[in-house]
Structures are given as structure tokens and as C-alpha cells.
Amino acid sequence: MRILMAGAGATGGYFGARLAQAGQDVTFLVRERRYQQLQASGLVLQTPQGTETLKPQLAQANSLTGHYDLIIVTVKSFALDQVMEDIAPAVGPETLIMPILNGLRHIATLQQHFGEDKVIGGLCKINATLGDNGEVIQMTPLHQLYYGALDGHNDARLQRVDAALRDCQVDTRFSDNIMDELWEKWLLLSTLGAVCCLARGNTQQILTSRGGEALLQGVFSEILSVITAEGYQTRPAATARILELLSDPATPMTSSMYRDLTQGFDIEADQVIGDLLLRAKRHSLATPLLNAVDVNLQVYLQQR
């Protein structure tokens, strides 16, 4: 299977590297700065098991040739419009596009641009970041990759995707209910991002602060009410596990949005929090905590 990995940051770099190491034909679509960096130093993975370096196949938008069987989109959500333009020449009649982005807005955007039959569901769970020299740093052993048809019907095309991905040295989950997985990932990451960015700290610091537990539970409840109104069929055991994970004061957690914010980078405020507020408004739901988070993030973006 010919695979195009759109992005070689922490997520794309890690999962693309594992696919390449498993023998898949993987090309990384990158910008000029990342292209030069990877050409010079290779794609470096720093994992709990040690350091690995591989020489990746690279392409830039103006050098893409031929169609790909699978395009995995791993960029930040605010870069999606440019990436859609970049990958367009690589999309053929049989191409499937699997976005691994935060939130859910990107799915409709990709479907409108390329067609509903082109887009499949995907998400990952990994604690990873880029180091100062562009190395991919996997901070914990967690490396899960979920995928499946958005309508739950995993036909022969999806079976081929699964055959390519399941032996890539990561924990793969071929899901027949990927939409619920996506809703639950959004519940987790938006709660985590909201409380960390608002309080400017990790969950351990928040939970051991006066009112911190109430803040976390209040944000979680608001988000759960929004996604339920939008169509999430609540799975009580799954949502309870998410809240339990977030509420453990012994495990300090932060979100990628919080880490980006503390470094002065652009953040996915509209995609992770703003979109929830738009959906809440559609159902006349009161979300005062989410509104406070959104104002906080907008002020940050104005001050960058």
C-alpha cells in the first residue's frame, strides 16, 4: 500500500516511522524547513526503549507524483486548508483519507472537499512531542492508533487499510464504531486542554488546588452535555474511565494545546473549544465554564 503521511511532527513522525519500519511504502509530505531538517539528520525517535534513526522518504507539495492508496493527515487543525490543497494531486479514484486531528470539524471539511466516500475515521493516543532539534520524543509507551469507516461499515477498502496498519509495531484498533471513539477522544482532550490552559498548570496542580476538582468536573459535564446533544450515544463505562483518568491527582497530565500555549505557539482554540461552543449554542445549552476558557484562549491569541 502506498501511504502518504501529511506531516512529520510528533504524531505523523512517530506513526509514519513505525509504518516505514514495518515495510510499508511511506512518504512524508513536509514543509521546506522540516524537509531540510529530516534530510540532514534523519527522522529520530526517542522512545522509552531508546533512540532510533531512519532515513525517511520525503516530498514537498510541488514534488508529489502519482496517487496514493492512503493519505494520513496529521497536521494541526488550523493548517488543514493548506494541507487539503497540498494533497489534492495525490488523491486518486481509490484513495482513502484518514485524518488524525483534534475535534470533529475537520471531517465535514474533508468530506466537502474530497467527497464523503474518501474520508475514514482515525485517531491516535500517544504522549509525544518534538524536541529542540526536531526529534520525535515519545514520553510514555502509549501508542494507539484507531481507524474505521465513519458509518461503521468496514468494507474491503477498510480491510486493506487494516492489513497495512495492524503490523506496524503499534497498538492498532480496527473499530466498527469509530464515531463514538472520536466523540470520547474529544471529550478527553477538550476537558484536559480547557482546564490546563485556564489554570496554567497540569492536572495534579489543578486537583490539589482549592476548587480544582470542581472546575475539572464542571468542564467535563459541560462538554459531555454538548457532544451528547450532537449525537454521541453515551457509553457510561467509557465516560467514567475518562473522568477517572483526568481526576487522578497522582498522575500529572497536560494537553498538547497547553504545551503549545506555554511555548507561545499557535493553538487549536477554535477546533477544540470554539467548535464546542458553536454546537452548544445550536442546542441552547449553557456552558459558562467553556465560555471562560474560550475568552482566555482568544486573549492569548491576540497577545501572541
Image (tube, rainbow, N blue to C red):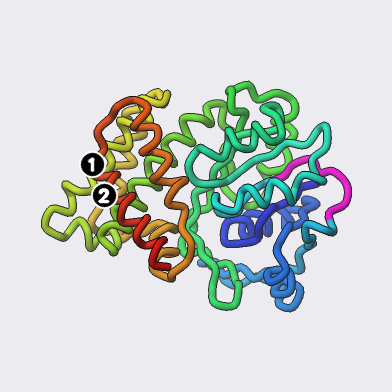
Q: Whole-Å distance between the Cαs marked 2 and 1?
A: 6 Å
Residue at (32, 28) in percent of width and height = 236
Say if 174 sits above or below 61 in the image.
above
The residue to which callout 1 is attached is 288
Q: Can residue 98 be seen in this view?
A: yes
Report the span colored magenta: 64-71
Image quarter where the C terminus lies is: bottom left
Q: Does the magenta stretch include residue 34?
A: no
Q: What residue type is labelled 1?
A: Pro
Query: Can you tell which quarter of the image residue 223 is in?
Result: top left
**Percent x, y of residue 260:** 45, 64
Q: Give left or right: position of 268 versus 119.
A: left
Q: Do the residues labelled 2 and 1 touch (CB within 8 Å)?
A: yes
**Percent x, y of residue 197:** 32, 58
Q: What element carries label 1?
A: helix
Residue at (41, 61) in percent of width and height = 301
Say if 221 sits above or below 79 in the image.
above
Q: Give left or right: position of 99 versus 163.
A: left
**Percent x, y of residue 54:** 72, 68
Image quarter where the N terminus lies is: top right
The residue to which callout 2 is attached is 292
**Percent x, y of residue 144:** 53, 47
10 Å crowding of disc 2: few (<14), some (14-19), many (20+): few
Q: Is residue 1 visible?
A: no
Query: Can you tell which quarter of the image residue 251 is in?
Result: bottom left
